Amino acid sequence: MRRLPLLLATLAVALGLARGPAALDRIPGPLPREAAAEAPPVASPDLPAAIPAVVREVLGQGLPPAAPGQALALVRYVIPPGTTLATHVHPGVQIASIASGRLTYTVLLGEVPVTRATGAGTPGPTESIAAGGVTVLGPGDAVVENPGVVHFGRNDGAEPVVILAATLLAADQPPAIVVNDAGTPVTG
């Protein structure tokens, strides 16, 4: 599983992703919010300084000709300690691998395959987390989040959780859509 980040980067290069200045999306507290910036991430000025921002950094992205209407991206997420992400879905597929830290991961609707890391650096056993399931993901563990899977993550640890993700999402949608526990989009 230690080879997954290298595999994801190789995939991105092989598919001809455009690489320019890294886009940083800051997600204050637990709710995703798109906000591209060139500067290093900082907490949003409309939030107390005690609530650090979740960072979504696009490492490379492109519009693959073989997937019209879809955007392919390689992304790094950094989730500060004590942060719970909003319940959400993705408008496409996200394959995510934990680079560091431990993420408590909950599936509310749908099913998510989890590949566990092994000490030998090769993929370990695969298990499935069904609706209502909770697991802890550690370094090298990977999940495949398909469209419609309602889920959220929580960093209960003392260090940030860093996630590397390959995404193939609808180009005209945000990378995460906040929903209620039944999967209905939340507005406002």
Image (spheres, rainbow, N blue to C red):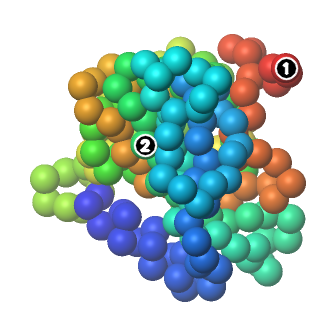
- Within the image, what quadrant is residue 168 found in? bottom right
Residue with the most extreme front position: 45
The amino acid pointed to by label 2 is: Val
Looking at the picture, tell me which residue is in the foreground, 98 or 57.
57
Tell whether 15 sits left or right of 54: right
Residue with the most extreme left position: 119
Q: Secondary structure at mark 1?
A: loop
Rendering coords of residue 174 (x, y %): 76, 45
- Within the image, what quadrant is residue 34 found in? top right
> Is residue 129 visible in the rendered structure shown here?
no
Compared to residue 142, the image places residue 63 above or below, namely below
**Distance (Cα) linking label 1 and label 2:** 25 Å
Q: Residues within 10 Å of mark 2 (few under 14, many from 20)?
A: many
Compared to residue 159, the image places residue 3 above or below, namely below
Tell whether 176 sits left or right of 117: right
Q: Residues within 10 Å of mark 1 (few under 14, many from 20)?
A: few
Tell whether 62 sits left or right of 6: right
Q: Secondary structure at mark 2?
A: strand
Compared to residue 16, the image places residue 42 above or below, namely above
Tag 1 residue: 188
Q: Which residue is at 60% across, 29% downward?
A: 45
Compared to residue 83, the image places residue 42 above or below, namely below
The amino acid pointed to by label 1 is: Gly
- Position of the N terminus, as image quadrant, is bottom left
Looking at the picture, tell me which residue is in the foreground, 83 or 135.
83
- Within the image, what quadrant is residue 123 found in? bottom left
Cβ–Cβ under 8 Å for marks 1 and 2: no
Q: Which residue is at 35% across, 38% downward?
A: 161
Q: Which residue is at 86% across, 65% downward?
A: 69
Rendering coords of residue 117 (x, y %): 25, 49
Tag 2 residue: 78
Q: Which residue is at 60% across, 76% downward?
A: 20
